[in-house]
Image (cartoon, coloured by chain):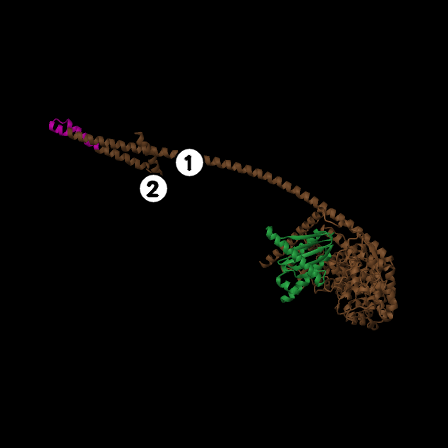
Chain colours: A brown, B green
Amino acid sequence: MRTPVQPDRPEGRGARRRRGARPAPRTSPRAKAAYLVVGAAVLAAGAPALVGALRAVRATDPETRARAASALQQHGALLVLCAVLAVGVVVYATRGVHGDDAADAADGRARDRGAQAAAAELAAVRAELAAAKESHVVERDSLLRERAALAERIGGLQASVQGTFVGLSRRTLGLVERQLSFIDELEAHEQEPGTLETLFRLDHLASCMRRHSENLLVLAGADHRGTRRANVPLIDVLRAAVGEIESYQRVVVSPDVPQVHVTGFASGDASHLLAELLENATSCSPPASEVQLTGRLLGTGDLLLVVRDEGIGISPPGRVDDLNARLADADPGPAPREALGLGMYVVARLAARHGVGVELRHRDRGLDAEVRLPARLLVGGTGSDAEGGAVGGGGAGAAAGGRAAGAGEAVGAMGAADGVAAGAGAGVGAGAGVGAGVGAGAVGGGGQAAPLPGTGGADGGRRTAAAEHGTPPGPGTDTGASDVRHGGAAPVRLGPQRSAPPFDGGGVRPSPPPFASARPAVAPRTGGWVRAEAGMLPRRRPGATVVGGAAGDPASAAGGGLIAGAAVHGAAPGDAVRGAAATGAVPGRTVAGHPAPVQVPAEYAGSGHTASGQSAPVHVAAEQVGSGPPASGHAAPVHVAAGPAVAEHTGSARPGSGHPAAGHPGTGPAALSTVPPARAAGGAAPAGAPAARTLAPQRGAGAGWSVPHAGATPAAGVRSVVAVPAQAERRGVDAREVRRLLGGLQQGSRDGRRAAAAEAATWDAKEQGAST
Amino acid sequence: MNSAQDHRDTISSLRWMLDNFTAEVPGVRSVVVVSVDGLPLLAAPPQSASAGEQLATVVSGIGGLTNGAADVMDAGRVKQTMVAMADGCLVVMQAGDGSLLGVLTEPDCDLSVAAYHMELFVGRVGHVLTPGLRGELTG
């Protein structure tokens, strides 16, 4: 019996389960009861028949008994069948009832067990998660602590590095300031033009160094320039800015900048900011091009200054926006890679400090940098004029000493006639003698002054000696002789010196008159612009316009003769330097052996002119001829290299001995090592100096060759002979040398590639940004 | 702006960049840009025609030789070539497509500085040395 039952149960349970799964009801107790009733009914139906049969059996009639017996047998069989059926039904019913219960109970238990297991499992997972969370929290806390510690450490390091920077640059600044004052002192007592000119250049270089040191301070977030109470005329802020850059000769300050003053506390930063923009403009534009600095007042009372260059601009226009965004940012991130970024960073910081708006604008050629000084940084010109004048007078005394005073006297005497003496005197005093040249011109007498420079200009911009000397034409000559020296000296000196006003108050000058009206016709070359290096443009009072007119006329008469015009301004050296720079670049780049540009310095030198101003141009011009682009601050070699170059260009036009460079100790020999091979080899330098330097045969094998400085040059004048020590050890190539060279080459090109790639990537990114 | 004007602008930019190169890198005697076929395109400081052509020929010859060698050896492109002489160095570098930059230096020139500026120059102007511009320069 077990065997059939066993397979049954699962089936039955399975079937019930399946049924149970469906909506149909399972075998309910009522159905089971019905089974019982059916069983009972069957029993009940069989029982009477059985009872009847039993009665019949008891009957006496044997026939009947026999029939009854067979009927009883039949009924009995039926009854048994019914009973069996009933029992079967009952058993089934009861068993079904009990079986269902048992199955349900088993199911419940199984479910309970499953739930318990799941709950346990969940609890375990939860515990696990809680543990993980706990550990993560711990880890996070430790990381946070670590981060805080690291941040603190980095902050400390940064602070210490910044502190180091600040300390270092302050120390440098201190030294530079001392150097400047020392140089000032020397300049005040120096009468020897050559030395004076050297001092001026030192002065300018020190000014540049000071600005760079201040950049370091700005980068470190420190402030250097103390608060100044005295307001500074705008023009002096501009001049200071111009004086702080290397190529100050190329900057042209508009003559009609508004006559306002910049509040003292902002003046230093304003000029520094402008200097950065100017430096950027000069370094990103061709060496012969000008950078214009203009200013005008806006309707809102703000002052708009524009630095305009004609350089390469900023190549993808999108980059301008990027730079503008950085400029507008009060604290742009540390400047990446490029040097440009450094300057921009400084500009942004300085601008943010005073709420100055700086914006770059792309132009067809070159770039405009617009600086908007808010009205609150400005003070009306009239109110502070007197103050400015007073300070100017004092400053002049301090800065220029006796020389300036002398010049001032001269002009004062001249100007006395028409009551502008005070103004002109102050102007000249402050201008450290530039005004003196103008004064000389004025003595020459307005209209009369014109003819001579006019002829100078007439011969196609070839400057005559007279014009270049800045000797005031005609009657003015004798007074000019002394004055010119001052006037000449001044520009060079003042170039750097212009940086002084905002910082030490030494040179605050009265604001300039409207120059544009004073000289209606300025030389075309200058196109109504006043040369910045003539920085020293006489600062005249409006009343002194006669003087201005006198000076201006010759200038315009000089026509294209920029230098002549400049010279007559009394700003000779400055302008001459500028002129030489402009023309000097020409032979360097296009016309080898072009005599004209070089002749300027040549004549200066040749004439044995002692005016410091005049020796300056020689020097600088020569330098530029030699080096092509007028990057000043060159190392010695170029310095003297220029000497020979000049010599070759101009032949015997002027004796080399007159050239300041020739007697320059130390630089001479150094330069000779680069230049004279051509000469030593007897090469006549057919292509002019640069070519000769490049391709002329190398020097002979003699040890310690001694080159007559000009000996081999056919048209040599008097020159010094300079010996250069032999460099015999250079012969032959050793492996170490090659390794060194190759290592340097590889290192350099790797760095260069990286820099170029970084640049390209920046542009690409900007281009993409612009295109999307 | 028409393209001729563009070209002129680009050329003048190239000129003064080259001039700046000679000015900024101490010890550089001359810098030339030549086309691979040996035509001098730009030189700083400017040289006489014959001298310029000589140097251009030398530079393009070196460039051609080394490029050929690199092809033969299957070693990628030529980065730069240095000819170390007793009294000077000549460094040749590919400048853009079809042009070469040659720099002649003093023997004591710091080549790392020179190479740095060369790569910078190439990176800046290599892409503008197009055949059209070359035509303008040589023509």
Q: Dot 2 falls on which chain?
A: A
Q: Secondary structure at mark 1?
A: helix
The residue range painted magenta reads A46-68
State whether the magenta stretch is mostly helix, strand or loop: helix
Q: Which mark is residue A111?
A: 1
Q: Amino acid at mark 2?
A: Ala
Q: Which mark is residue B137?
A: none
- For residue A5, above or below residue A670: above
Residue A54 highlighted magenta (yes or no): yes
Q: Secondary structure at mark 2?
A: loop
Query: Residue placed farthest to the front in the image?
Result: A701
Quarter the C terminus of chain A occupies: bottom right
In this rendering, position of residue A679 left or right of residue A372 = right
Q: Position of residue A265 (x, y in %)?
A: 76, 56
Q: Position of residue B109 (x, y in %)?
A: 73, 52
Q: Nearer the viewer, mark 1 or mark 2?
A: 1
Let me know if residue A166 appears in the view.
yes
In this rendering, position of residue A165 left or right of residue A53 = right
Q: Dot 1 falls on which chain?
A: A
Q: Amino acid at mark 1?
A: Arg
In the image shown, does A769 or A450 lie closer to the viewer? A450
Q: What residue would you read off at disc 2? A: A24
